[in-house]
Amino acid sequence: MKTSALISSLALGAAAALALTSCSASDEASQPKRGDHLKVVVTTTQLADFAAEVGGNDIELTGMLAPGSSAHHFDPTPADLLSLGQADVLIVNGAGLDEFIDSAIDASGFSGTLVDASAGLDLETARAITAETLEGQNHEGEHEHIDTHGHSHGGAEGAAEPQSADSEGSESSETSEEDHDHDHEHGDLNPHLWTSPRFAQGMVQQIADELAKIDPEHGDGYYERAGAYNAKLVTLDEWIAAQFARVPAADRVLVTGHDSLRYYLHDYGIAYAGSLLPSFEDNAEPSAAEIDSLVAAIKNSGVKAIFVESSLSPKLAKTVAQEAGVAVIDEDSLYVDSLGPDGSGAETYISASLHNTRVILEAWAASIDPVPSALEGA
């Protein structure tokens, strides 16, 4: 979704502020400021959490999206553009999610280094998962974990493996004032990559690799923190997998508000029966025929409940659920497009993943193990 018209108008105010607060552009603008923290701007709330875990006290972090907001319909503010114009690093989800960023880069005059977190993943595997249907769903849910130095281990063939931004066939993540365009032609790729804790590991590793490359003085710290955090993501993945493994395969069928959990469902052998909105985005409009088709799929597939994401209104879900004769889970929403606000119990990536898993399992009347001690408070 492009917001270039609005961003162009906001740019005038941001440009005036930048003229007062920043130096003229030079070759040094894209380099870390020695003696200062590396200034890092990220788009989504999940990336903000990943960057905070990896960067620690070695970065000054600014998140563009607030908890509860969605990248599908986000308009940067003048303050966002000001922060972006002064940033050394911009971290994006990529995979066609944060398309607003192209115009924001133009408007802000950003001349630092662009880091695409999705470059740490095998996107062809992601495309294959995107294309899965209810009939063709893989109930094994296996692909490889990713360790903190980019090596795959312990999974099935065809797993997601991190790919260095400098490897053959890939492009550098660096950008300049004239060269910051990046590919958003991902119509066959679901951009909600972070919903898989296994893919999240690759995104965390990509962030660590790029920050260490940009700021080698603190490289050891980036890798150490990424390793510790990815160990928690492995524990998270194993805990979630163990919970769903006890649920009979015939009962592992899900309907959500929009097509946002495809990778999570794949990982844990949960069949995807459909979504209320026929799109990766959360602002699409379903037709009457699409709603009728979904109701029929719900009746025929053993779906027990419709789960509503925090970014969506539950109104349509209640209508469809009434027609299909199933429950609606909306009081405890799933946190997918955004992490939750303070007090939600879903303020971090790990806590949101635990929350979402518990909500689904409780609706299915499944037993739930205690959370591993390594994840408590994470």
Image (tube, rainbow, N blue to C red):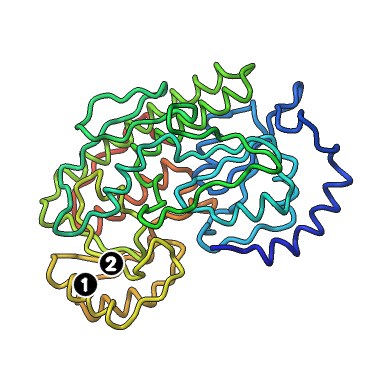
Residue 79 horizontal side relative to residue 322, left or right: right
Report the disc number at residue 345.
none
Instruction: Please state the horizontal and vertical placement of residue 59, each as a whole percent of the image.
Output: 65, 30
Neighbours of disc 1 within 10 Å: few (<14), some (14-19), many (20+): some
Q: Which residue is mark 2?
A: 306
Q: Residue at x 45, y 40 (%)?
A: 118
Instruction: Please state the horizontal and vertical placement of residue 136, each as a whole percent of the image.
Output: 15, 54
**Relative depth, front residue between 283 and 56:** 283
Q: Residue at x 72, y 54 (%)?
A: 107
User: In the figure, 59 relative to 368: above or below?
Assistant: above
Name the N-terminal-most of marks 1 and 2.
Answer: 2
Neighbours of disc 2 within 10 Å: few (<14), some (14-19), many (20+): many
Q: Is label 1 in contact with label 2 (beta carbons under 8 Å)?
A: yes
Which quadrant of the figure has residue 229? top left
Q: Amino acid at mark 1?
A: Val
User: In the figure, 357 relative to 87: above or below?
Assistant: below
User: In the figure, 147 relative to 71: above or below?
Assistant: above
Q: Which residue is mark 1?
A: 326
Q: CA distance from mark 1 to mark 2?
A: 7 Å
User: Which SS class for mark 2?
Assistant: strand
Instruction: Please state the horizontal and vertical placement of residue 77, each as a whole percent of the image.
Output: 70, 58
Residue 208 horizontal side relative to residue 278, left or right: right
Which quadrant of the figure has residue 323? bottom left
Q: Is residue 348 visible?
A: yes
Instruction: Please state the horizontal and vertical placement of residue 151, each as a whole percent of the image.
Output: 35, 22
